[in-house]
Amino acid sequence: MKKDLNYYTNLDYEIITKKISPKDGDGWFAYYKDFRGVMGDGETPQEAISEALEAFNAFVEVALSNGDAISLPHEEDKTVRINITMPSKLVKKIDEYIAPLHMSRSAFLQKLAKDVI
């Protein structure tokens, strides 16, 4: 497969959006998690993402013309929100166990899964 602009723009890179406070100019900010400096802003999240996409296209075009390496998405860093059901007594025991460890439920369950798998 040819690694051209089309190849990179169709990969699943994570774009993060954040609300800009009124004191900082208001609106929205979007950036590529894997590429420092590839970002955009706008009045809406969609506008910010659109600008970030344009910035990414420009970044890829320049990198390709210079022969620079372009990293692939970091799949293992991506998170997925899941909804699970557990007995309330078990949740309470987990919370009691992790409280002195200063660990979230998610971090605890991730650690257990990694240890077992």
Image (spheres, helix red, strand yellow):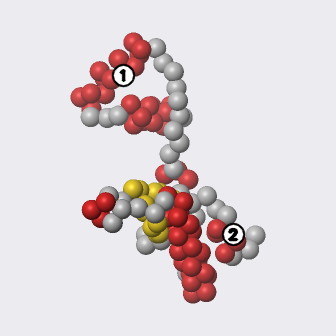
Q: Quadrant of residue 6?
A: bottom right
Q: Quadrant of residue 1?
A: bottom right
Q: Residues within 10 Å of mark 1 (few under 14, many from 20)?
A: some
Residue 115 visible in this rendered orientation of the protein: no
The image position of residue 116, as x and y in percent, is: 50, 31
Residue 7 is tagged as: 2
| Residue found farthest to the left | 100
Residues under numbered marks 2 and 1 in contact, where contact means CB atoms less than 8 Å apart: no
The image position of residue 28, as x and y in percent, is: 43, 61
User: Which residue appears at 31% of the width and 35% of the height?
Assistant: 103
The image position of residue 104, as x and y in percent, is: 35, 34
Secondary structure, mark 1, is helix
Q: Which residue type carries mark 2?
A: Tyr
Q: With respect to residue 105, does 6 lie above or below?
A: below
Q: Which residue type carries mark 1?
A: Ile
Q: Nearer the viewer, mark 2 or mark 1?
A: 2
Residue 94 is tagged as: 1
